[in-house]
Image (tube, grey):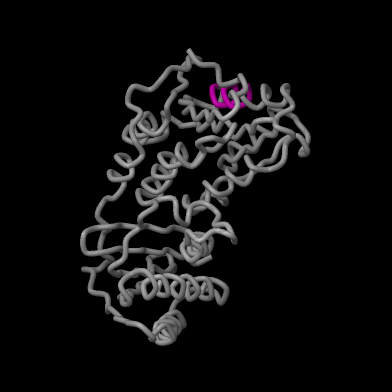
């Protein structure tokens, strides 16, 4: 049995899933984790959905200086943003003390597309945090979430805590296998997927931007959100020209809620699944800055790789 209240050893990363049923179990499990961190004088980040955040604050009754509180419905609106935020917290100077993080990236009401990207995040966090002295506790509402989501949590977490017991998960899987299962075919836009395609090639980045700007003016997006969309498209198209074979295609369509979706297809590859999800270093030559910016601008980013190339689907909400 493993005790997640104990500090990890130097170089150890601990990543348990906490299965809870109801608020009492939630407050006991997450609250106990936070209290243990505070008793050890370790930095704590709590990133959970807003209603859970309020309940934890009330039950713990700690000052803002002791715990960093973050609403995961904002931070994790795009699951592709979560990893870098957790890494940023873990890497803060703390006098050698390990970081304690509560991260709840999946909650009832998430769309299927969001759940897939959040599951991908949970799989990738194990390699992304390798070598960091930190614990990331991930609560899962086993009564409110589909059984498949809970099953995937057993695959993405080395240990599982349920009914007060912490045990190794026999279903824990390699990240590549989990990510491959997250690559479900992208659905065609409604109705019927009959969306015009704009093809572009080297030297035509300006034409891509002009096409997108003209289309965006006919949407319900605010000026700020139109700006986010145009910049995300520009970054994606620039990646196509630099790394995707020198050409690509763009499709644009509106959603029922007044948002917009932009899809870029090209002949590129995604050699590193962490590109765009971790903050790129200014001194690094590994790239990923364009994809990083796209994740910051968009409310959801879906990436699919196949033999013919790469598909990048970017979602912008109305507000």
Looking at the picture, does residue 308 appear above or below residue 216?
Answer: above
Q: Is residue 127 left or right of residue 155?
A: right
* Figure label count: 0
Does the magenta segment cover residue 27? yes
Q: Which residues are magenta?
A: 25-32
x and y percent of residue 134 in the render?
Answer: 59, 32
- Which quadrant of the view contains residue 265? bottom left
Q: Is residue 83 left or right of residue 302?
A: right
Q: Is residue 145 left or right of residue 7?
A: left
**Residue at 76% across, 31% down:** 62
Residue sitting nearer the eye, 171 or 243: 243
**Residue at 33% across, 44% down:** 179
Query: Which secondary structure type mostly characterizes the magenta part of the structure?
Result: helix
- Which quadrant of the view contains residue 313? bottom left
Residue sitting nearer the eye, 58 or 90: 90
**Residue at 52% across, 64% down:** 293
Residue sitting nearer the eye, 115 or 167: 167
Does the magenta segment cover residue 198? no
x and y percent of residue 232 in the render?
Answer: 47, 70
**Residue at 39% across, 73% down:** 242
Q: Is residue 177 left or right of residue 235?
A: left
Q: Residue furthest top?
A: 1
Quadrant location of the C terminus in the rendered image: bottom right
Looking at the picture, does residue 289 appear above or below residue 250?
Answer: above
Looking at the picture, does residue 29 appear above or below residue 295?
Answer: above
x and y percent of residue 175 in the render?
Answer: 36, 39
Residue sitting nearer the eye, 11 or 29: 11
- Which quadrant of the view contains residue 311? bottom left
x and y percent of residue 36 in the render?
Answer: 67, 22
């Amino acid at each position: 049995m493993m005790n997640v209240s104990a500090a990890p050893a130097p170089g150890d990363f601990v990543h348990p899933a906490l299965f809870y049923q109801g608020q009492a179990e939630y407050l006991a499990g997450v609250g106990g984790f936070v209290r243990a961190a505070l008793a050890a004088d370790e930095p704590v980040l709590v990133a959970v959905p807003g209603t859970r955040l309020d309940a934890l604050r009330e039950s713990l009754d700690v000052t803002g200086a002791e715990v960093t509180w973050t609403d995961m419905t904002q931070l994790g609106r795009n699951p592709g943003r979560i990893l870098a935020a957790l890494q940023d917290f873990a890497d803060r100077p703390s006098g050698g003390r390990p970081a304690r993080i509560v991260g709840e990236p999946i909650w009832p009401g998430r769309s299927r597309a969001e759940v897939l990207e959040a599951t991908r995040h949970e799989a990738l966090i194990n390699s992304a945090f390798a070598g960091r002295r930190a614990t990331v506790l991930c609560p899962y509402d086993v009564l409110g979430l589909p059984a498949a989501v809970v099953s995937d949590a057993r695959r993405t977490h080395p240990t599982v805590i349920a009914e007060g017991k912490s045990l190794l998960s026999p279903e824990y899987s390699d990240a590549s296998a989990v990510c491959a299962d997250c690559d479900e075919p992208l659905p065609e836009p409604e109705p019927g997927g009959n969306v015009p395609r704009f093809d572009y090639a080297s030297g035509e980045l300006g034409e891509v931007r002009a096409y997108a700007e003209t289309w965006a003016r006919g949407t319900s997006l605010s000026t700020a959100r139109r700006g986010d969309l145009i910049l995300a498209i520009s970054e994606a198209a620039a990646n196509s020209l630099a790394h995707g074979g020198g050409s690509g295609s763009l499709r644009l369509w509106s959603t029922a809620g007044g948002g917009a979706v932009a899809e870029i297809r090209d002949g590129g590859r995604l050699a590193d699944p962490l590109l765009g999800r971790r903050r790129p270093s200014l001194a690094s030559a590994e790239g990923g800055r364009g994809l990083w910016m796209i994740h910051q601008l968009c409310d959801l980013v879906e990436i699919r790789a196949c033999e013919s190339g790469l598909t990048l689907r970017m979602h912008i909400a109305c507000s």
